[in-house]
Image (tube, rainbow, N blue to C red):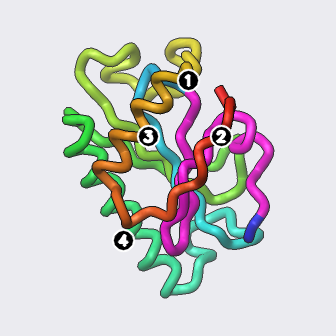
Amino acid sequence: MAALHERLAADCIELGRFPLCRLLLMNDANYPWFILVPDREGVEEIWQLDETDRLQLLQESCFLGERLAECFCADKMNVAALGNVVPQLHVHHVVRHRDDPAWPAPVWGRVPARPYGEAGLRHLRQKLKYCLGEFLAWEPEPETRV
């Protein structure tokens, strides 16, 4: 298993795994914000993945985006792989609503992050389990991670 960049580990909560990627939740309750991280060591760009992994990443990203859009009634899904601060390849999936705190601008740095409380995180996990179900190998829920 590839090591998770320290910034991702500090800012996110691990939810589970798809065949290629870990699914992380950005610990910012302002937006439903998820991150796919391919479990490949030393990969910074999508084109560095072999063809099979590139296709798998695309499948997982499209599946996640479609399910999140439905589950959270998205007005728009923002999907991006930037890597300017965290070089490890990771793909953001941010559910956007016209009434969210940053609309229509990008979410980065618009408002201070609002960490999930224990109840909010529990509710979000339940909602995701309904939306993603058996397609994700779920991480055990931590005792207190919030």
Dot 2, crowdedness within 10 Å: few (<14), some or many (≥20)? few
Residue at left offset 68%, top offset 30%: 144
Q: In the rendered structure, which disc, 3 or 1, sits on the residue that comes first in sequence?
A: 1
Q: Which residue is mark 3?
A: 125
Asked if the residue at tag 1 contacts the one at tag 3, i.e. Cβ–Cβ closer than 8 Å, the answer is no
Q: Earlier in the sequence, mark 4 or mark 1?
A: 4
Q: Which residue is mark 2?
A: 142
Could you classify mark 1 by the number of other residues whose Cα lies within 10 Å: few (under 14), some (14-19), or many (20 or more)? few
Q: Secondary structure at mark 3?
A: helix
Q: Earlier in the sequence, mark 3 or mark 2?
A: 3
Q: Quadrant of residue 8?
A: top right
Provide the residue span drawn in magenta.
3-27
Residue 51 colored in magenta in the image: no
Please, is residue 110 above or below residue 63 in the view? above
Q: From the viewer's perspective, is residue 32 above or below residue 37? A: above
User: Element type at marker 4?
Assistant: helix
| Real-space Cα separation, disc 3 to disc 1, in angstroms | 11 Å
> Where is residue 117 shown, x and y percent of the image?
55, 19
Alpha carbons under labels 4 and 1: distance apart: 31 Å
Q: Amino acid at mark 3?
A: Arg
| For the residues bearing labels 4 and 2, Cβ distance under 8 angstroms | no
Give the image quarter of residue 32: top left
Q: Earlier in the sequence, mark 3 or mark 4?
A: 4
The mark nearer the N terminus, 4 or 2, is 4
Q: Earlier in the sequence, mark 2 or mark 1?
A: 1
Q: Which residue is mark 4?
A: 59
User: Which quadrant does the C terminus fall into?
Assistant: top right
Residue 36: where, in percent of width, then height? Answer: 52, 56
Residue type at mark 1? Answer: Glu
